[in-house]
Each structure stands twice: as C-alpha cells, then as structure tokens.
Image (tube, helix red, strand yellow):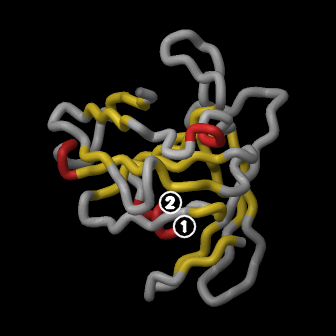
C-alpha cells in the first residue's frame, strides 16, 4: 500500500496536539486535492511521527502527482478541502509547518529535494491605512528555478484575500 511518512520536529507545543493534512497536485501546484479522502488528516505521534496510508485513493490519477503538499495544523483546525482548487487560504494560514515535495523526491538521497526554507526581508511596507508599495527580497533559494511570492491579506475578522 502506498504511504507517505515522516517526522515533524521543533513544534511550538506537544507534537500530538497537531495533525498533518495532505494535498496532491497533478498540475504543478495550480490545483490540489485533499488526500486520501475529503476531511482527512493524520495525528502526529508524541514524537512527531506520522504515516499516511492509502493516500492514492484514485490510483490511476494520483500516482501521476507533481507535488505533495503537507500542512501541519493544530488539532482544533477543521480540515478545509481542495477539490481541483487552490488549497484554502485559511489552511495555509493555520499551518505551523507547510512543505511541498516534488515528484521524484527521495528522502535522504538528494533526488528531487524540496526547496529550502527561504528568508524574506521586507524593504518597503505601507503605513497603516495607506496603499503604499510592498517590496522585499528573498534569499536562500536555489538558482535556476522559478518561484513565486504570494501575498495574503487578512482582515481582523479572518477574511483572507490572495493578492
């Protein structure tokens, strides 16, 4: 049976107060599907380990994934599904850890290694109640690969927009 397994370290609270939600993309990250079934998640063990079995619930298509995206969220976070859509912004915002793994990734081999964590430095940011420019630099990404920076705007009421 196909499985995805790993360990999450350095969490801000006890590991078993978090869960892992898995999404797969067939088109390089434009659209995703919740796996193995809608509403599903896997609780981390006290040591931070997890195993997601049977994730290829539609094997003829799922085995052709381009990206697996794992979000580690608090147990209290409802799972918001993706069904041929972007991952819901509220899920991304709730994640204490979010990581994408490209097709071909092999743990410990260096093959298909996911992008490293990048450092973002803001160089311009608007003052309160203004529409000034937002600018910055991103460091720590491998050369020769294309990356995007996405800006999320969130109101105090929890409404989120992607800009």
Q: Is residue 105 left or right of residue 38?
A: right
Foreground mark, 2 or 1, reads: 1
Q: Residues within 10 Å of mark 2 (few under 14, many from 20)?
A: some
Q: Is residue 97 visible?
A: yes
* Picture coordinates of residue 42, whole percent (x, y): 30, 46
Q: Which residue is mark 1?
A: 88
Front residue (pair 124, 59): 59
CA distance for labels 2 and 1: 7 Å
| Extreme residue toward the right, this view | 144
Can you say whether 140 is above or below 110 in the image? below
Query: Residue 104: which numbered mark, if any?
Result: none
Residue at (75% x, 61% y) in the render: 135
* Picture coordinates of residue 37, whole percent (x, y): 43, 54
Q: Specify the quadrant of the image occupied by residue 78.
A: bottom left
Q: Which residue is mark 2?
A: 92
Can you say whether 131 is above or below 103 in the image? below
Task: Give the total number of marks visible in the rendering.
Answer: 2
The answer to whether the residue labelled 2 contacts the one labelled 1, judged by CB atoms less than 8 Å apart, is yes
Q: Is residue 118 visible?
A: no
Residue at (55% x, 45% y) in the render: 58
Q: Specify the quadrant of the image occupied by residue 136.
A: bottom right
Q: Secondary structure at mark 1?
A: loop
Q: Specify the quadrant of the image occupied by residue 53.
A: top left
The quarter in which the C terminus is drawn is bottom right
* Picture coordinates of residue 47, whole percent (x, y): 19, 31
Residue at (38% x, 29% y) in the render: 5
Q: Residues within 10 Å of mark 1 (few under 14, many from 20)?
A: some
* Picture coordinates of residue 133, whole percent (x, y): 77, 72
Q: Is residue 97 left or right of residue 14?
A: right
Residue at (68% x, 57% y) in the render: 31
């Amino acid at each position: 049976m196909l499985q995805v397994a790993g360990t999450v370290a350095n969490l801000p609270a006890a590991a078993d107060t978090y869960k892992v939600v898995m999404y797969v993309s067939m088109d390089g990250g434009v659209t995703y599907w919740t796996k193995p079934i809608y509403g599903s998640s896997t609780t981390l063990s006290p040591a931070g380990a997890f195993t997601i079995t049977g994730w290829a619930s539609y094997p003829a298509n799922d085995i052709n994934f381009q990206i697996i995206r794992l979000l580690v969220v608090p147990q209290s976070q409802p799972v918001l599904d993706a069904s041929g859509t972007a991952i819901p912004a509220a899920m991304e915002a709730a994640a204490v850890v979010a990581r994408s793994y490209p097709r071909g990734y092999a743990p410990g081999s260096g093959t298909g290694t996911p992008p490293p964590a990048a450092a973002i430095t803001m160089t311009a940011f608007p003052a309160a109640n203004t529409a000034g420019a937002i600018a910055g630099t991103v460091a720590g990404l491998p050369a020769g690969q294309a990356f995007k920076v996405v800006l999320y705007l969130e109101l105090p009421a929890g409404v989120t927009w992607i800009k």
